[in-house]
Image: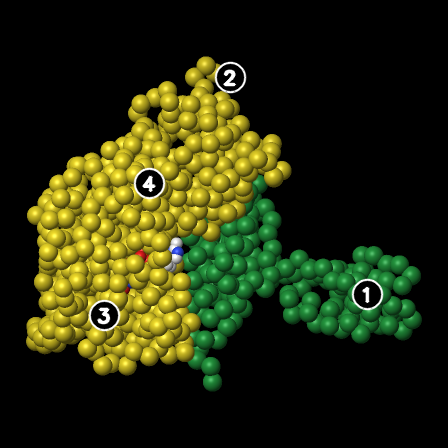
Amino acid sequence: MSKNQLSGSQILLKALSDQGVDVVFGYPGGAVLPIYDELFKQNKIRHILVRQEGGAVHAAEGYARSTGKVGVVLVTSGPGATNAVTGLLDAMMDSVPLVCICGQVPTHLIGNDAFQEADTTGITRPCTKHNYLAKDVDQLARQIHEAFHVAKSGRPGPVVIDLPKDVMMAQADYLPPAKVKHKSYNPPVKGDLGKIREAVKIMAAAKKPLIYAGGGVINSGTAASQLLTQLVQTTDFPCTLTLMGLGALPASDKHFLGMVGMHGTYESNMAMHDCDVMVCIGARFDDRVTGRIDAFAPNSTKIHIDIDPSSINKNVRVDLGIVGDVGHVLEDMIKLWKSGQNRADEKAMKSWWKTIDKWRERKSLSYDREASIIKPQYAIERLYELTKKRDEVYITTEVGQHQMWAAQHFHFDRPSRWMTSGGLGTMGYGLPSAMGVQIAHPKALVVDIAGEASILMNIQEMSTLVQYNLPVKVFILNNQYMGMVRQWQELLHGGRYSESYMEALPDFVKLAEAFGGVGLRATKKEHLDDVINEMVACDRPVIVDIAVDPKENCYPMIPSGAAHNEMIFGPGDDADTSVSDEGMVLV
Amino acid sequence: MTPIAEIENAHTMSVLVDNEPGVLARVIGLFSGRGYNIESLTVAEVNMEDNLSRITIVTSGTPMVIEQIKAQLERLVPVHGVNDLTVEGPHVERELALVKVRGSGEKRVESLRIADIFRARTVDSTNDSFVFEIVGDTGKLDAFIELMVPLGLIDVSRTGVAAIARGTTVLDHD
Ligand SMILES: Cc1cc2nc3c(=O)[nH]c(=O)nc-3n(C[C@H](O)[C@H](O)[C@H](O)COP(=O)(O)OP(=O)(O)OC[C@H]3O[C@@H](n4cnc5c(N)ncnc54)[C@H](O)[C@@H]3O)c2cc1C
Ligand SMILES: Cc1ncc(C[n+]2csc(CCOP(=O)(O)OP(=O)(O)O)c2C)c(N)n1
Ligand SMILES: [Mg+2]
């Protein structure tokens, strides 16, 4: 044994630090004590003690999505690891780069139903991009470096390292992160130039084009969002964004049609239905976006840019698939567009924009602004208006109606300012995620737009906020219902509100105070602005309880199993709101 | 008439993987988790030096599903390459079966006669049983086994398909 050898725990911390990690979200337990002992002895890496492992994973997601870095989680074996599972799948669905270190029972006990043993690699296999059981301390450093490479390259995702306690204590030489060239894993970056040329040709011939961009643009980095904006402005094409893509094109850009999909704008969905050329950039034709597949953009030629070949032709057959990183492909695409002096048919574009402007006149996001009660949309609008002048504002959400209203009424002019659980739709995501964002951006205003049901799923993290003095703001649109569930029951199940009313809600003001934070409440429209201003000015964690209209529904909406041109608009709209039998089974 | 896009065809895929713990579970988990069919699956180490195994999978699906299966397999970190032999060109498929038949008298003689026609070898025999070893493509094995049913077939063990491209073509190593 050479005297330069390190223990497994020391190797872990050294590898993390060499990977540029400065913060780890975690929770201790028997199987990770040697790591915690090493953490104690150093001060390079900051450890944030959450209150439940699920909170650690969402916090790491918020951290990762708002910085573009890999989020790191440390949990113990058994229940520690299983508590992390929801967050891992959440990160998998939304392409968030994470590395999660799980303690494991010592190698000689694996398989014996030892105390706090779980088959962590077995459980997490389908909800991670990759996982390792690190049985050999000599391989540990390499595996950790590889884990970071896998997590952040290609389509990003979560990677688990299951680390038995005896391996943490065994000795080995440390291996620095040499340029990892994996034997089999080498995701592409550049797109095929011939195909990009072909795409430009199709785009130049379009009469009713549409750019449909998504989370992949955000994943690709800030430059990709700038390139998208450049492409949109050079081509003069209209552009819609998915829930995950909000901010990739400034909401204030005149080419932006609003969000697409189930709760997207009328103009976005009509443009998607009627377009003759669709350029999908880093989006994945999710069923929330496509609606009924056989009626999806029936007359369009579809181009799809995605770094993951399995995203192409998964749900929707496309005419031209380009595998590559959004940033790289857009760079080539813009170059080719400009050098070929391509211009879309001026007359056709003029008439296309005229049609779109007609759809815009429908004002599909309007609501009753005169109501005396606080409408949830109004609350978000005021939050936006009163904070839009600030430099750094980050919004996270929970899951439900409030999430959709936030997507519709808060406007993002920059990427990575919006963190939401899209693919898995995990209630309880918003508060811990905001915590991770605030750690990464201590000076920023970070607001979790929440529902009163969702917030109770990870409310314990209030305690973490107080411990680390993280001034996260929890903005609860309290409608006393699991609003999204109630809305579906109203539309699909004859108004039988089975178990969707939130009985015995806590007093959120007192709850905030009990945790050591600040509680505020608004029950009247005329007090709303004051409460928001007070919240923003406060330098401590705040919960704001806003009493909103309990019966408000989220519109517009494409009912399950319907097509884009079959949207419903809510009260005052006499369209047919009935749902087909096929639609009833969809979620 | 069923449109071409909806016709399900059998495809033989050859998957080169790192021979490491859990790799087979990843492949099988992918198929079960995403609802793909596995008609047969074989796996064994094929390259000791680089520590590689080859998994041969016979699956079936519409063209879009087959394309997904290939892309999904290629997404797995320890997978080096996936070849869809059915679309890539001429290839050879072989499978081995051990077939146990119990009987006496006329049936026993008849089973031996058919085994001979199929070039099956007798690898075990007792006074009232035979075990035949037969090698061939899946169709040949199916035919042989079917003929053995009325002659006292009591047990079958099959390896599943192993496959390789014809000619000098080498399957994807990367
Ligand atoms: C209650 C609720 C309602 C919802 N309603 C809607 C709705 O109305 N509208 C809506 O849009 N969504 C809605 N969603 C979200 C929806 O479920 C999906 O999460 C979302 O539509 C997926 O977004 P995306 O297509 O941008 O893909 P993402 O999940 O962000 O995936 C990104 C894609 O880009 C690719 N990619 C990643 N990195 C790169 C790169 N560097 N270069 C190239 N490609 C890359 C990935 O391979 C992937 O295919 C809703 C969710 C909930 C919970
Ligand atoms: C963990 C989890 N369980 C259940 C659901 C299903 N679900 C989706 S929205 C919702 C209600 C959310 O209620 P609330 O947080 O009050 O938000 P609102 O819709 O009222 O704005 C439920 C139960 C989910 N998305 N996540
Ligand atoms: Mg609610």
Q: Which residue is mark 2?
A: A1
Say whether residue A476 is visible: yes
Q: Do badges 4 and 3 share one subunit? A: yes
Find residue A578 and report its horizontal and vertical position in percent. 33, 79
Q: What label does residue A461 carry, if any? A: 4
Q: Real-space Cα distance between discs 2 and 4?
A: 44 Å
Q: Nearer the viewer, mark 3 or mark 2?
A: 3
Residue identifier under label 3: A556
Q: Amino acid at mark 1?
A: Val
Q: Quadrant of residue A273?
A: bottom left
Mark 2 lies within 8 Å of ligand 1 (Cβ measured): no
Which dot marks residue B101? Answer: 1
Distance Cα–Cα, label 4 vs label 1: 67 Å
Which subunit holds the residue at mark 1? Answer: B
C-alpha span from label 1 to label 3? 68 Å
Q: Colour of chain A?
A: yellow
Q: Amino acid at mark 3?
A: Pro
Q: Residue at x 57, y 35 (%)?
A: A115
* Marks 4 and 3, the one that precedes in the sequence: 4
- Residue A44 position, x and y percent, is 30, 25
Q: Report the amino acid beneath label 4.
A: Glu
x and y, in percent, of residue A30 in the image: 49, 30
Q: Residue furthest top?
A: A3
User: Can residue A172 be seen by looking at this rendering?
Assistant: no
Residue at screen point 38% across, 35% down: A26
Provide the chain ID for the residue under circle 3.
A
Dots 3, 2 in contact, CB < 8 A: no
